[in-house]
């Protein structure tokens, strides 16, 4: 009788883990996504990328902030080419090549400019890691970040059913454990 009980509980535990794993797999798109409503802030932080540029310009023109902070010279020049006044732009001192560098390289500017609140603009599937990273880098800086999503076409609920969404999820997921190990960032 004891053997049957062990087998039963083993199967039940495995089935539970399988079900939880499957549910987790199906909901990864929702888990990665993060989007907060924009509000008045001291600055908009435009992480590099075309859709992010468009969203940052929209937030600026709607009056949510009076400046856009960029993380690369390319983004800075793209904003100038879009007729954004230079006085509304904060140019990076170094070009960032990763989310971690974006957070790190902006830190001194945020402190020097006395930024107390900022809207960080990125793609929806990227915002979870952005939040972890900025929270980690700014843990001793009195600044409040809100995370604003761009609007690329992606199916977070059925990410596996759309090629573009699959690419987003499958490129973002490996970066999370990498950030845990390389930068000590834990959610």
Image (cartoon, grey):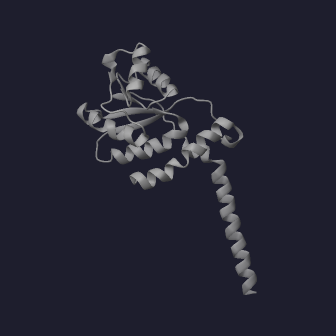
Occupied quadrant, residue 115: top left
Residue at 69% across, 43% down: 160
Residue 36 spot, x, y in % from top left: 48, 35
Q: Determine whether, in the image, residue 185 is placed left or right of residue 29.
A: left
Residue at 32% across, 35% down: 106
Give the vertical position of 10 relative to 57 (above or below).
below
**Nearer to the camera, 150 or 101:** 101
Residue at 64% across, 38% down: 165
Residue 8 spot, x, y in % from top left: 73, 76
Q: Determine whether, in the image, residue 133 is placed left or right of residue 91.
A: right
Count of marks placed on residues: 0
**Nearer to the camera, 2 or 78:** 78
**Residue 41 visible in image:** no
Q: Determine whether, in the image, residue 151 is placed left or right of residue 115.
A: right
Residue 38 spot, x, y in % from top left: 45, 29
The image quadrant where one finds the N terminus is bottom right
Give the vertical position of 24 relative to 143 (above or below).
below
Give the vertical position of 96 relative to 24 (above or below).
above
Residue 127 spot, x, y in % from top left: 49, 39
Residue at 45% across, 41% down: 130
Residue situated furthest left in the rendering: 112
**Residue 66 visible in image:** yes
Occupied quadrant, residue 161: top right
Residue situated furthest top in the rendering: 83
Q: Determine whether, in the image, residue 149 is placed left or right of residue 157.
A: left
């Amino acid at each position: 009788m004891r053997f049957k009980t062990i087998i039963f509980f083993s199967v039940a535990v495995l089935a539970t883990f399988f079900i939880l794993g499957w549910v987790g797999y199906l909901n990864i798109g929702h888990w990665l996504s993060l989007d907060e409503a924009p509000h008045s802030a001291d600055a908009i932080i435009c992480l590099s990328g075309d859709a992010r540029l468009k969203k940052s310009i929209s937030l600026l023109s709607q009056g949510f902030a009076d400046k856009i902070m960029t993380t690369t010279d390319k983004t800075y020049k793209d904003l100038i080419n879009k007729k954004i006044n230079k006085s509304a732009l904060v140019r990076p001192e170094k070009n960032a090549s990763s989310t971690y560098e974006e957070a790190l390289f902006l830190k001194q500017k945020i402190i020097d400019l006395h930024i107390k609140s900022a809207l960080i603009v990125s793609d929806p599937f990227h915002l979870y890691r952005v939040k972890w990273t900025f929270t980690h880098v700014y843990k001793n800086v009195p600044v409040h970040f809100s995370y604003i999503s761009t609007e690329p076409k992606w199916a977070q609920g059925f990410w596996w059913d759309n090629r573009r969404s699959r690419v987003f999820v499958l490129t973002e997921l490996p970066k999370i454990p990498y950030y845990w190990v390389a930068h000590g960032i834990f959610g």
